[in-house]
Amino acid sequence: MKFEGSFSHFDKAYDKSHFLTFSHKPLHCKLQMQIGFIGCGTIATSIATGFLSVDSNLSPVVTHCHVTRRSLSNSLALLSKFSPSKVTVHDSAQSILDVEDVGTVFICLLPKACQTVLPRLSFTPERQNIVSLVSTGSLADIRGWTSFPEADTDTDTNTNTNTNTMESQSQSQSQFGMVTKMICLPSIAMGRSPSLIVPPTPYLEALLGPLGGTVPCSTEAEMTKMMIPTCLMGPYYKMLKEVKTWLVSEVGCEGNSAKADKVEFFVKEIFMGMAMDLKGKSIQDCIEEQTPGGINEMGVRNWESLGGGGVVDGCCDGVLERLTGKGSGVVSARK
């Protein structure tokens, strides 16, 4: 990590009307960081893009990302977008871990790959922290695979990091050896995805502030349940596809690709606008805004009569079942 001058960003007051409120501790220095990624899939690429797109005058700020060559298309895309001055592509994960300036390593592998890849690598807990994006891998799993020492407690492990020590070029060993689990969506690349993290980790919360903020969880069990909305991305897009398909059929433009594209554009823009309307409002507020007896209010009643709530419950239950290892997560149609 590199330190320069005196700068404070995260003591700013966030708009309380925003649908999420974040709290960041002030950092009275400019903290520049290099981070590494083991695995360069969609999530790793999105996080790296988000970090490297942040205003370089903020603090803390990521100034350089070290990524593994695989997946080649993603690593080369990052290199092309940000240049070698900000991105280094490594032939092996170990070469990233060997870079002394890399103090935080993001693990972005599938669970099965973690079990075979991570134990073969040599981590250095004395100068590294780990952030795991492995959805079904526990903190204990990650520590076991990487030989990081066991945490003192099951929760609030990383909250003891003294902000004052972050401001000193002479970092104490207590700042390292931390393992944090994190969940986010690809929209983090645009600064539009709040990240779930466990345990609360002050320096990571500050780092992720400009990328959509964080929602710290007190336990892994709590995080598992909070993850459910992130697993509804597919069903959400499927619903939009059904709306588009219905419109294309009703408008009669199945054979007209140009007109069908306009229908898709309209559907996407309408739903993005709906999402923006949530800012500063509760979800219930938005439902209650529908005019009594109006078409949208009728749509809500029809949705309920057709079992829409049951569909959502079933999807959530299935995801939770799979995440907790209690079953396959596949649910049958509910009457």
Image (spheres, rainbow, N blue to C red):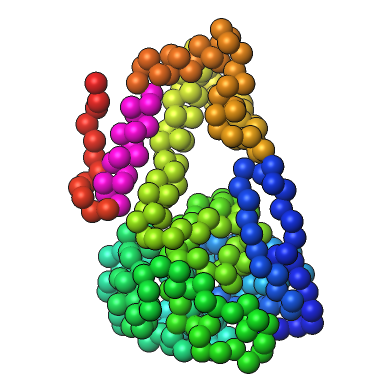
Which secondary structure type mostly characterizes the magenta part of the structure?
Answer: helix
Q: Is residue 189 magenta?
A: no
Residue that appears at 55% across and 78% down: 161
Please provide percent x and percent y for residue 204.
Answer: 56, 68
* Visible residue check, residue 247: yes
Q: Is residue 310 magenta?
A: yes
Residue in front for this viewpoint, 31 or 202 = 202
Residue that appears at 42% across and 41% down: 232
Please provide percent x and percent y for residue 66.
Answer: 54, 76
Q: From the image, which quarter does the C terminus lie in?
A: top left
Residue in front for this viewpoint, 190 or 84 = 190
Question: Outermost residue, top direction?
Answer: 293
Please provide percent x and percent y for residue 308.
Answer: 38, 24
Residue that appears at 32% across and 71% down: 140
Left or right? Give the position of 221 relative to 67. left
**Whether residue 20 is situated above or below residue 55 in the rendered picture:** above
Residue 259 position by quadrant? top right
**Whether residue 261 is situated above or below residue 104 in the rendered picture:** above
Please provide percent x and percent y for residue 103.
Answer: 54, 81
Magenta region, residue range: 308-323
